[in-house]
Image (tube, rainbow, N blue to C red):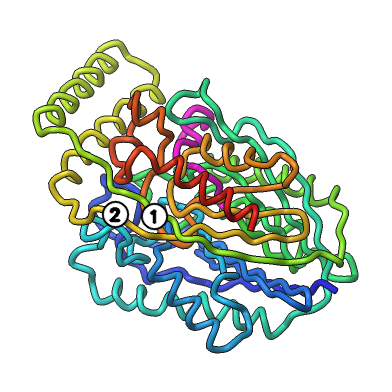
Amino acid sequence: MLLGSSKKINITPPIGLRMSGFDERNHGADGILNQLFANVLVLGDGLTKVAIVTLDLSGVDKVLTKAVRDAVSQKTDIPHHAIMLIASHTHSGPEAWHTGDMGKISRPVDMTPDEIAYRNVLPGLIANGIVWANKELEPVKLGVKQSELLGLGSNRIDAARYVDNTVTVFRVDRLNGEPLALLTQYTCHPTILNFTNYLYSGDFISYYQEAVEKVFPGCIAMFAQGCAGNVSTRHNRKSFGVTEAHRMGTMLAGEVIKDATLVDTHDDLALSAAIEPLKLKIRDFESDEECERRIKVVQDKIDELKANNAPDNIQRTAYVELQGATRYYKLKKRIDIKKVVVEMQRISIGEWNIISTPAETFGEIGRNIRNLDRSKKTVVTGYTNASVGYIPTRETYRNPVGYEVGVALVSEDSEDRLVKVAKKLLTK
């Protein structure tokens, strides 16, 4: 018999904390547009328990993950390797969630007392949600439905390139047929609220959650972010701001609600979980002269696009490419590590596998992991359990275009390393 429980924990920080995601911001949050949550799902099959937590944060690091796992293991029988933390990557949440997986360059500097206090209390809030859910397990049924959603996410480097439009809905029902939780896996940067926004929000994901929970009272709508390193709404959104975030969140909710009504659920699903270490090398950086040359080339391109009144999305792509080139040069001067050891994780629910990646992983890498074994049903998450920054494809390193490869810290063989570890997890 399958058991389950889902809880919603408010993790909205105090007003005034620095916000994550955009360098252009120059002060902390002014208020709250949408509350931020840690949404928890605990499942058990009589032999194994797993816990999946989706977070309205820009990321999680391995320090936070370990703290949550340690706290949960002291109070429950859920093992370390069966606890998964997935960040939505909202760019309208707090910066204070991390202490840094990538050395000094990824650690917040000059943290305020409120930021330190939030960082210290966050693991306990998340862990308590898992402990609470574990105490209230009840018989459930679970089913999975996939569909395709067009018009929301696209490849932000080039709209003609690959993008994963798949929506995967894990529906968890009470025995009376009412949904307890809907865990949605989809792939798209939550950046419709841009750097002019100083209100905490999960971006379009908050509006997806609100719409789904209105249709299914008592249900918790969870969001598991996919490999969104090169996926955003850039080429599909009509504007920035709340109205557009609401429109696109409602679009996702509509697809999820439709899928949820079509799911067949079962109560005889087996659970399992595993973790494997992932060892990544820090990239080799180019000379100072080449860094300066690249910055000038991109700046010249921006000037030309402005002079020719190029479309906003094209100018935005060039602008963030300049940000990438500039950050690359700064990172070269500050990096203080040669390698990083993180993890990848598998949680299996019946015939479905959730494979984690600890990064802003490119969509093509997620596809390659899913295609390792076509006989298996697999979804791949990004921003999970740790944070090593962008992991572009090997091809992108060799033919760099856009912002992402400029700020990537790990070496170009990282794609191969991820796929190799994923293969091991899928055969474990």
Residue occupying the point 45% across, 31% down: 156
Q: Find residue 327 and report its horizontal and vertical position in percent.
A: 22, 41
Q: Residues within 10 Å of mark 2 (few under 14, many from 20)?
A: some
Q: Which residue is mark 1?
A: 279
Q: Is residue 207 left or right of residue 414?
A: right
The single residue placed furthest to the top in the displayed view is 308
- Residue 303, given in percent of the width and then of the height, sits at 22, 18
Is 158 situated above or below 327?
above
Residue type of the residue flagged with mark 2: Lys
Q: Nearer the viewer, residue 31 or 282?
A: 282
Q: Quadrant of residue 27?
A: bottom left
Residue 312 against residue 218 in the figure, above or below: above
Q: Which mark is residue 339?
A: 2
Considering the numbered disc 2 on the image, is that residue within a helix, a strand or a loop?
A: strand
Question: Looking at the image, is 388 positioned above or below residue 108?
Answer: above
x, y percent for residue 309: 32, 14
Q: Overall secondary structure of the magenta stretch?
A: loop
User: Magenta segment: does it hold 227?
Assistant: yes
Q: Which badge, 2 or 1, is on the more N-terminal residue? A: 1
Range of residues picked out in magenta: 224-243
Q: In the image shown, does 32 or 327 lie closer to the viewer?
A: 327
Residue 65: x and y, percent? Answer: 45, 70
Whether pointer 2 and pointer 1 mark residues with C-beta atoms closer than 8 Å, the reply is yes
Label 1 crowding class (10 Å Cα cut-off): few <14, some 14-19, many 20+?
A: some
Q: How many marks?
A: 2
